[in-house]
Image (tube, rainbow, N blue to C red):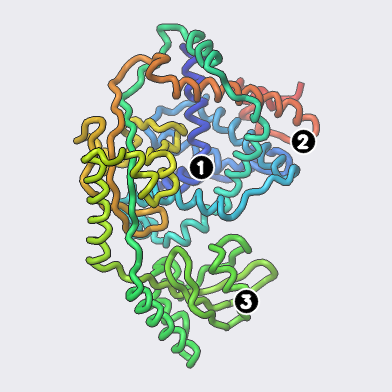
């Protein structure tokens, strides 16, 4: 039983660390004990700070778990593993694109925007704009993707067969099989509200007016304070602070790098809206700019048009003209779910099943009123880029609490079996790399079994 619980804890830990940026965001608002920071681990040229460990352990406790020194050591072990992977990703020239980083940021912030009930609520809570929050976590997301890619290289031959899954299941003592809570599977068809041309024209005309006022001598920063919709930077006269090349969306950077200090750009369109940009200072590949951001207005007619569009799709599904999955593939504008027939994937497990406490509360309220195969009415939601949208949800399946079995829980068991096989491959890789990689660890962890693999023999 103890060994099985340990395996499940490690699986939880991996999914938790894999969502480190989300963990960091949720921890911003919590008052945490002040820690005298120090280096507690090194792998190559990558360091682990005590504050990193304490932050993740605090999140573990905040999720309702009891204090557990063994879990603290497991978190340290995972941090060491991640630093080792990150260091060797650099040596092996593993790369991730800015579009990959941006896609991950969009997906994760969409989740938190939903949790807070909207983009404005999230910005108000942290007193930072979405742009500022994204830039704050961009380096963490990039490191995370590098770790994932490097781990994928190390464990590429660790896939499991159905026979492996069966053997794993049969290796668990019958009295140690876990109780699986109620889970739901659901799908969506989405349609975001597009800005109409008249609204775009009005927005750009207003921004061009501000640009002309600056060119005639008015202070750019004062106008940003008054009019910019990026409230986080507006309070600083529109200033974003020094950024590295690749930190901001491509359209913004391309315009910014053409400017000399003091110059103002033409209107720049990005997924956030329309900007005018002023270069403050450039130091090699680092640059500091200020901007004014405006967005076109969404009209009632725009909202009605999109809601009616989804209503017509729902009617086609109810009349059996097409299935929900077919409609999602054909009509949904959410590229993360449409090609999966609208099915939403649980970011913590990688499966399509969610325990009820993993579903955003307002979404769960809607699903809880449905039977499998039923749809909601058209609902409002906030898309990944912060735009207003509408969607239809369908409840695909709802399980009842039960003891784990192969028939109902194959996907979950496959994940755990695969995780164990990947862990073994990763441990073997670390053992090979230890001889050629400098590493050290704080004395606190040297006598802990979770960290034994880091000790020299």
Q: Nearer the viewer, residue 300 or 222?
A: 300
Badge 3 element:
loop
What element does badge 1 sit on?
Answer: helix
* Disc 2 to disc 3, C-alpha distance: 42 Å
Residue at label 2?
437
Q: Which residue is mark 3?
A: 258
For the residue carrying disc 1, how many other residues have a C-alpha within 10 Å: few (<14), some (14-19), or many (20+)? some
Q: How many marks?
A: 3
Q: Kindly identify which residue carries mark 1.
A: 20
Establish if 386 lies above or below 293: above
Who comes first in sequence, dot 2 or dot 3? 3
Q: Residue at x 50, y 12 (%)?
A: 166
Q: Quadrant of residue 319?
A: top left
Image quadrant assignment for residue 245: bottom right
Q: Nearer the viewer, mark 2 or mark 3?
A: 3
Depth check: 419 or 298 in front? Answer: 298
User: As rendered, which of 94 and 379 lies closer to the eye?
Assistant: 379
Q: In the rendered structure, are the residues bearing label 2 and label 3 in contact, judged by CB atoms less than 8 Å apart? A: no
Indicate which label's residue lies in the foreground, 1 or 3: 3
Quadrant for the C terminus in the image: top right
Examine the rendered structure and indicate whether residue 200 appears above or below residue 125: below
Label 2 Cα neighbours within 10 Å, binned few <14 / some 14-19 / many ≥20: some
Give how far across and how far down residue 303 sits, in percent: 25, 61
- Left or right of residue 171, residue 89 in this image: right
The tag on residue 381 is none
Q: Residue at x 48, y 12 (%)?
A: 169
Mark 2 and mark 1: Cα distance apart in space: 25 Å
Measured as percent of width and height from the top left, residue 429 is found at: 71, 28
């Amino acid at each position: 039983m103890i060994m099985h619980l340990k395996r499940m804890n490690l699986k939880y830990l991996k999914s938790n660390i894999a969502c480190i940026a989300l963990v960091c965001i949720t921890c911003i608002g919590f008052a945490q004990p002040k820690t005298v920071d120090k280096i507690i681990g090194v792998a190559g040229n990558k360091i682990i700070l005590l504050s990193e460990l304490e932050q993740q352990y605090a999140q573990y406790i905040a999720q309702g778990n009891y204090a557990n020194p063994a879990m603290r050591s497991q978190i340290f072990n995972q941090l060491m593993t991640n630093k080792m992977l990150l260091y060797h990703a650099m040596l092996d020239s593993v790369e991730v694109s800015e579009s990959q980083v941006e896609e991950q940021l969009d997906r994760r912030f969409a989740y938190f925007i939903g949790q807070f009930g909207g983009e404005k609520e999230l910005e108000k809570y942290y007193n930072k704009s979405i742009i500022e929050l994204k830039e704050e976590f961009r380096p963490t997301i990039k490191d995370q993707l590098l770790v994932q890619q490097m781990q994928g290289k190390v464990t590429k031959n660790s896939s499991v067969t159905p026979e492996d899954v069966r053997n794993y299941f049969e290796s668990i003592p019958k009295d140690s099989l876990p109780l699986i809570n109620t889970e739901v599977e659901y799908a969506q068809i989405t349609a975001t509200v597009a800005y109409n041309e008249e609204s775009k024209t009005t927005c750009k005309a207003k921004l061009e007016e501000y640009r002309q006022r600056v060119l005639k001598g008015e202070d750019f920063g004062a106008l940003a304070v008054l009019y910019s919709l990026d409230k986080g930077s507006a309070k600083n006269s529109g200033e974003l602070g020094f950024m590295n090349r690749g930190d901001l969306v491509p359209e913004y950077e391309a315009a910014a790098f053409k400017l000399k200090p003091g110059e103002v750009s033409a209107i720049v369109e990005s997924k956030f809206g329309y900007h005018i940009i002023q270069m403050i200072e450039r130091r090699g590949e680092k640059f500091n700019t200020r901007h004014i951001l405006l967005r076109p207005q969404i009209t009632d007619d725009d909202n009605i048009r999109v809601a009616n569009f989804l209503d017509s799709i729902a009617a086609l599904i109810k009349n059996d003209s097409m299935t929900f999955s077919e409609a999602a593939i054909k009509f949904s504008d959410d590229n993360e779910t449409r090609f999966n027939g609208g099915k939403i994937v649980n970011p913590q497990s990688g499966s399509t099943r969610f325990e009820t406490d993993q579903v955003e509360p307002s979404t769960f309220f809607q699903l809880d009123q449905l039977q499998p195969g039923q749809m909601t009415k058209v609902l409002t939601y906030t898309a990944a880029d912060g735009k207003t949208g509408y969607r239809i949800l369908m409840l695909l399946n709802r399980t009842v609490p039960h003891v784990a079995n192969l028939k109902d829980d194959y996907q979950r068991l496959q994940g755990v079996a695969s995780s164990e096989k990947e862990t073994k491959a990763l441990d073997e890789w670390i053992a090979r790399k230890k001889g050629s990689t400098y590493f050290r660890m704080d004395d606190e962890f040297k006598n802990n079994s979770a960290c034994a693999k880091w000790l020299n023999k």
